[in-house]
Amino acid sequence: GQNIDQPTEMTATEGAIVQINCTYQTSGFNGLFWYQQHAGEAPTFLSYNVLDGLEEKGRFSSFLSRSKGYSYLLLKELQMKDSASYLCAVNDYKLSFGAGTTVTVRA
Amino acid sequence: ETGVTQTPRHLVMGMTNKKSLKCEQHLGHNAMYWYKQSAKKPLELMFVYNFKEQTENNSVPSRFSPECPNSSHLFLHLHTLQPEDSALYLCASSHGRNTEAFFGQGTRLTVV
């Protein structure tokens, strides 16, 4: 079966950095995705890691360690619009999602 | 706008009703998915279609019946639902199983 864990909620201040951790235990592994979902909207793709290491995309970076079953999403220079739910999803030939981390950015 | 369109956006139905959710994608993807999203729970994969063929049914009750007439359209037929089926139903598509999925806006379903 699949077990994907991430914190339920995080709060940070505008301009700060927040790191959202995701640990997983899945029967297979073919990559890990991060999605952003604003309230009432569709999840939108942020990043994809299939090899170990850091992928950087502007203010967002994602890291993967396959041996540890661990990933994190790093959000830098936080803006109010970054307040959303962040979903970690593991691809073992089907996408299995964590419950999501709700990030609240305060002024 | 992600290229995946779902209708209706909101649906209220009684437990004896029959209704259908529709999903359409114009991205040229060959895989389409139905997910259920309940409050505070992970997205649950319900069905997967690849090149119009159902490749996954995640132990979904038979009161949910999917249909994929072609690779651009996906339906979810609903009948005799229960109040606990109230949730956001999301459709997604992708080029294959190893690429990112693009989600529709979802249908907010309330069963009364």
Image (tube, coloured by chain):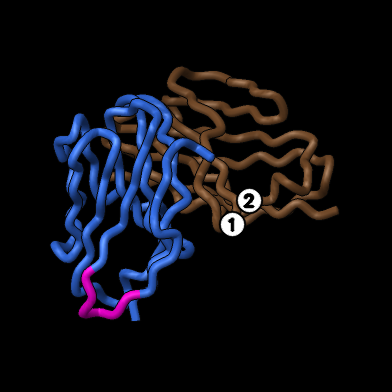
Chain colours: A brown, B blue
| Left or right: A98 in relation to B97 | right
Residue B97 against residue A89 in the figure, above or below = above
The answer to which of A55 and B37 lies nearer the viewer is B37
Mark 1, mark 2: which one is toward the viewer?
Answer: 1
| Left or right: B20 in relation to A45 | left
Q: Position of residue A103 (x, y in %)?
A: 66, 51
Q: Is residue B17 covered in magenta?
A: yes
Could you tell me if residue A30 is visible in this image? no
- Classify residue B25 by image quadrant: top left
Q: Main secondary structure of the magenta part?
A: loop
User: Magenta region: which residues?
Assistant: B13-18
Q: Which residue is mark 2?
A: A84
Identify which amino acid the numbered label 2 is placed on.
Ala
Q: Local crowd at mark 1 within 10 Å, few (<14), some, or many (≥20)?
A: few
The answer to which of B68 and B98 lies nearer the viewer is B68
Assign the N terminus of chain B to one quadrant of the image.
top right
Q: Position of residue A80 (x, y in %)?
A: 77, 48
| Residue at (23% x, 76% y) in the render | B17
Q: Which residue is mark 1?
A: A39
Q: Local crowd at mark 2 within 10 Å, few (<14), some, or many (≥20)?
A: some
